[in-house]
Structures are given as C-alpha cells and as structure tokens.
Amino acid sequence: MSCGWFGAFSGCKGKHGVNQTRVEGILTSDVKCFSYNSLRSATTNFHQSRKIGGGGYGVVYRGVLRDGTQVAIKSLSTGSKQGTHEFLTEINMISNIRHPHLVELIGCCVEDNHRILVYEYLENNSLASALLGSKSKHVALDWPTRAAICRGTASGLAFLHEESEPPIVHRDIKASNILLDGNFNPKIGDFGLAKLFPDNVTHLSTRVAGTIGYLAPEYALLGQLTRKADVYSFGVLLLEIVSGRSSNKAAFEEELLVLVEWTWKLRKEERVLDIVDPELTEYPEAEVMRFIKVALFCTQGGAHQRPTMKQVVEMLSKEVHLNEKALTEPGTFRVRSTSHPSGINVSETSRAEKQKQPSNPSVNLTHSYSSQTETTLLPR
Ligand SMILES: Nc1ncnc2c1ncn2[C@@H]1O[C@H](COP(=O)(O)OP(=O)(O)O)[C@@H](O)[C@H]1O
Ligand SMILES: [Mg+2]
C-alpha cells in the first residue's frame, strides 16, 4: 500500500488529472477527487436532513451522486489542524486497501479549506445506532446476525493487523465505527486515528488516542501501542454485542463495575450468561459462552496474553476448546483525575466518582482523545 507518511507533497487527481490543491502529506495516488460543488449538490447543500452521523471531527451526510450512487460524505470541521491531520491519515490508510469488512473510500475533496471524504454508503448506519441506539434507531438483532457481525469485524481487523503491509493498528475500534450494510454485514470505518505499524518495531510509543471504555490499560496508562490494544477494544466490543449494553454508558452493581469487570465477576460466580442481552430470547448457549470467553481472552490485563486477531477469527468461527485455566484477569482503564504521564489529559473525573452514588460513570467521557504528534518508533 502507499503509505509514505512523512513524504513530500502531492495531491489527489481531479477529473483532468491536475492537482487541485497543495495538501502537505497526502501521498496516495488513486483517490478520486470530487469538486466541492458536486458534493454540495449531492447532499442538497449539506442539508440537516441528510445528516447520518457526527463524531469527533465533523459531520457525515448521505449523498446521492449524479449517477444515482448513494455515498456517505464525511466533512471535516474546517480550520482544525487536528482535523486535517486525521483527514490525511484516513486517506493514507484506506485508499489502497480492499476487504469485504473494511469500508471503501471512494474519493475525497480538498478544495480550499474543505476536507471531505467520500465513502460507500452503508444503509444500516453503525452498530452503535442499531444495537445501542435510542428506541427510534434500535434494530432487533438476532444471535446469528450478531455472531456474523463479530466474525466479520474480527476478520477485517485481522486483515489490518496481519495482511496489510505494513500492518495497521486502528486504535478506535468501537460500536460507532462498525458500519452495517443493508444485510447487516459489518465494515470497519473511521480510520482517523489509525497508525501504520512498520515491521521492525515491537510497539509504538505514542500519545494516547481512542475512546474511554475501549482503551487497553497499557496503552491508556503507558502509551504503549501494539496490535493488542485493538484486540482489547475488540474484546470490549464483543461483550457489547452479546450484552446489548454500551461499555461506556453503563455501570454494574454497587461497585459501578465496567462491562468487562462485571463479566469477570459473573464468570467467577458461574453465571456469566447473565450478561446476555435480555432481547435475545433464543440463542445457542455453548456458542454464546464461547464468544464471552473469547472476549475475556481479548481483554486480559497482560497484552502479550491476548490472542492475535487471526486466532480470534478462528476462535469465533470454530468450536474450539478454550483453555480457561490460562485465562487471567481483565485489565481496565478508569478515568481518575487531571494530567497523565503518557500525555493523555484526563481532565474529567467520572461523575459517579464525584457524586459517590450509582450513576453512569462515563458521562462526557465518550469522546476520543487524540494527538497528532509525538509518535516514536521503538526498535525491536
Ligand atoms: N459509510 C457510511 N455509511 C453510513 N453511515 C456512516 C458511514 N460513515 C459514517 N457513518 C455514520 O457517521 C458516524 C460517524 O462516522 P465516523 O467515520 O466514525 O466519524 P467520526 O470521526 O466523526 O467518528 C458513524 O458512527 C455512522 O453513524
Ligand atoms: Mg467514529
């Protein structure tokens, strides 16, 4: 893949093969360039009614191109330096990779100060809205659909980690970044925080980016980024899919346990199936049990003890026996107080901690922490 992150300027090719604008750092060549006007008309002037999502760095609209193709148009907030960096990252990451479980980038617009990404459109929006969203967005997902979402996401991530060259760490695996097509097939999206992971390094030491509730402890606390940080986030996602509960919007029992801790506790009490979404009236117990165990293997405190995504795909696809004796306690990262040694600025103490009463421990903490600088490559 083309991934010369630190290279010189280039631009994407417009209709006439000309560089439309100077955008430092973009090195990809095969990205289709859209004019701002064409995207404006595709979204009826970026009309509110076309809005299908919005997150850390801009707003996502449903657009219809002149030939009738539906697309998702992600417009980054202008003027934000960070936004531009995310934009360049995202283009670099995905322009040259194709996989059935990775969202396809169709093109971009880099006119004046506009930074816009154009993606294939996925009819069923995100897993967050279908599984964890408000009543109006909620979709009843049966077990076979959920299992397929888990396997598909796992295989997309395994591809990023093990087949893409160099490997890519996504860094923000979570329900809102798993998009669902018309048949609820999952596709991993939002590569804004992804990092290339050259072969000759064991880990990247980086400032922390990601989303509270999904952060592997060694990454959140020490800034040590390996593929295993994604494996951890994937484990959290698995538990959300099984339980139908958001890991950063729910706390369990008096101790206000996070989803992973609660699952571990129930397992010790030999009633781990209590986490299963009450909406799932029918499900194969042995398989669901296996998925929960896989999630616990993925979220172990020690990064090296977590499986690779390739192993995870296997564990989710076959009736493998999992050696539970090897399973160790999950690690969790909880937000405490102010400044953090790794560079993360954790300025918000959870409301639950402040008020010392049962409540949502992660209100206001669902945003992404991110940085655009200070990535050091540590040699093996
Ligand atoms: N290709 C797409 N098809 C349908 N909906 C999408 C698509 N891309 C993004 N969305 C919606 O927009 C939301 C935000 O998109 P995302 O790429 O994650 O941006 P952000 O960086 O703002 O988090 C997603 O959670 C989803 O609801
Ligand atoms: Mg997102």
Image: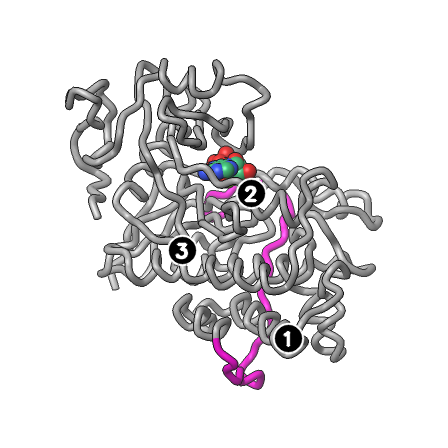
C-alpha separation, residue under disc 3 versus residue under disc 2: 31 Å
Mark toward the start of the polypeptide (2 vs 1): 2
Of marks 2 and 1, the one in the foreground: 2
* Residue topped by disc 3: 225
Question: Is residue 369 in view?
Answer: no
- Residue lying at 15% horizontally and 23% vertically, measured from the top left: 17
State the separation of the CA atoms marked 2 and 1: 27 Å
Of badges 3 and 1, the one in the foreground is 1
Kindly identify the amino acid type of the residue bearing the numbered disc 2: Asn
Q: Which residue is mark 1?
A: 289
Disc 3/disc 1 C-alpha distance (Å) = 29 Å
| Depicted 326 relative to depicted 256: above or below | below
Residue drawn at x 18%, y 28% as measured from the top left: 9
Q: Which residues are magenta?
A: 318-344
Q: Nearer the viewer, mark 3 or mark 2?
A: 2
Q: Earlier in the sequence, mark 3 or mark 1?
A: 3
Does residue 317 appear in the picture of this structure? yes
